[in-house]
Amino acid sequence: MLVQNLAGKRVAFAASGGLDSCTITHWLASQGVQVICMTADLGQPDEISMTEIERRMRACGATDFVALPLGSATAEMGLNVIQAQACYEGRYWNTTGAGRRVTVHGLVREMQKRGLKIMSHGATGRGNDQVRFQVIAAMLEPDIEVYAPWRDPAFLRRFGGRQQMIEYCEQYRLPIKATREKPYSTDANLLGLTHEGGRLESLATSADIVTPVMGLWPRNSPDEEAVVAVRFEGGRPVEINGGKLPLLTVFQRLNELAGLHGVGIGLHLVENRFVGVKSRGVYEAPAMELLGTTYALLKQIILDRRANEIFDCVSSYLGRQLYQGYWEDVGSQMARAAVARAARLITGTVHVALHRGNIRFVKAAGVTHSLYTDASSMEQVGSFDHADSEGFLRVLTLHAKTLARAGQLFQGGSDGVVE
């Protein structure tokens, strides 16, 4: 879809309130497009208010503005990620992918209420977000059309990049926050922050240039440990230090507490984008890291090895699916059903100590479905009689002896095995 096809039409634009949003809104309005800006309130810690974003967008030519209250939905999505342990390429908690899913759901619902058929977004042609916006929207409402300015030749001729956009906004005196000197860009929601671009694009630049928003670098955090108790019931965190809290408040409190102690602050990752190029990010996700770790500690106590094997497979799969924008498809639905079955068993309280970015297990209590029983004891027989292992070992060694006698086990030689 090209801008010349949009004159006089109403377009729902996913606006963050930043440089791209201001530029695109004003440019589209100047082309005769009725731009309805929709901004998702995802509990992002770096934005002053929805009122301020509305002021910017209307000043840039928006015919209407809608604030989408999605903080609680973001917390629920974060819990989905934690229950699936759906990290991407290491310990990145997929905070941006999770936020985009929540945003698109809210955006599509609002478009349906208003009878809007055209969606626009400011995602570039090199990134993951274009896929997330459009694939998710297509699965929710297949008749939606999409206008992506960063894939429109007319827009690209006018704006080569950030500097041209700043110059444009300065020319028209648009209320932007961006400056030419800003060393990197930040994308934020309740679950975490992503810092990338600018000086961070150079691998010669240390991640130390980032000023954390959700906490402190571990080296700057308090020297004293803080012990926190998190209770899960049926896979949901319901208490912090004995006090019952709604899920949104759990995330808010743990972002403060974990962030203060440097937990989940400053993960550096050179990741593989879905489009086939690499990008560098520096991430913050304090509550996600703390809740994800405590959930995993309970899972260790509860699931047996066969259940864990299935869980690990679907966890890795869902991490990729969420990153790529496919959390809605049939494969993800099947995998999420397996995760939900495991979550029903995750009940218990985990006490951990936070110190300089680290999380140390202290103790666990009230783990209803624990498989850690007296059979595991090294000190007493309990329900596991050592003598019972005699027959068990005869069965195991029968197969081992058969392999050896059949000449299948090479002892040295061209295969490189040391004798």
Image: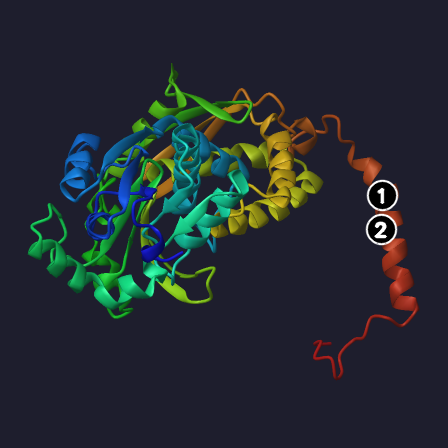
Which amino acid, by three-letter code, is at mark 1? Phe
Q: What is the count of numbered marks? A: 2
Q: Residue at x 34, y 23 (%)?
A: 249
- The image shows residue 95, relative to residue 346, as above or below, that is below
- The image shows residue 154, relative to residue 105, as above or below, that is below
Q: Residue at x 17, y 38 (%)?
A: 58
- The reply to whether discs 1 and 2 touch (Cβ–Cβ < 8 Å) is yes
From the top left corner, tell me how far across and down residue 224 is, in percent: 25, 36
The quadrant in which the C terminus is found is: bottom right
Q: Residue at x 42, y 49 (%)?
A: 146
Q: Which residue is mark 1?
A: 392
Would you identify the image quadrant in which residue 337 lies? top right
Of 328 and 231, the residue lying toward us = 328
From the top left corner, tell me how far across and down residue 164 is, in percent: 17, 63
From the top left corner, tell me how far across and down residue 349 is, in percent: 48, 24
Question: Farthest residue in the front direction?
Answer: 8
SS for dot 1: helix
Which amino acid, by three-letter code, is at mark 2? Leu
- The image shows residue 182, relative to residue 177, as above or below, that is below
The quadrant in which the N terminus is found is: bottom left
Q: Residues within 10 Å of mark 1 (few under 14, many from 20)?
A: few
Can I make out residue 221 in this image?
A: yes
Query: Disc 1 versus disc 2: distance between alpha carbons?
Result: 6 Å
Q: Residues within 10 Å of mark 2 (few under 14, many from 20)?
A: few
**Tag of residue 396:** 2
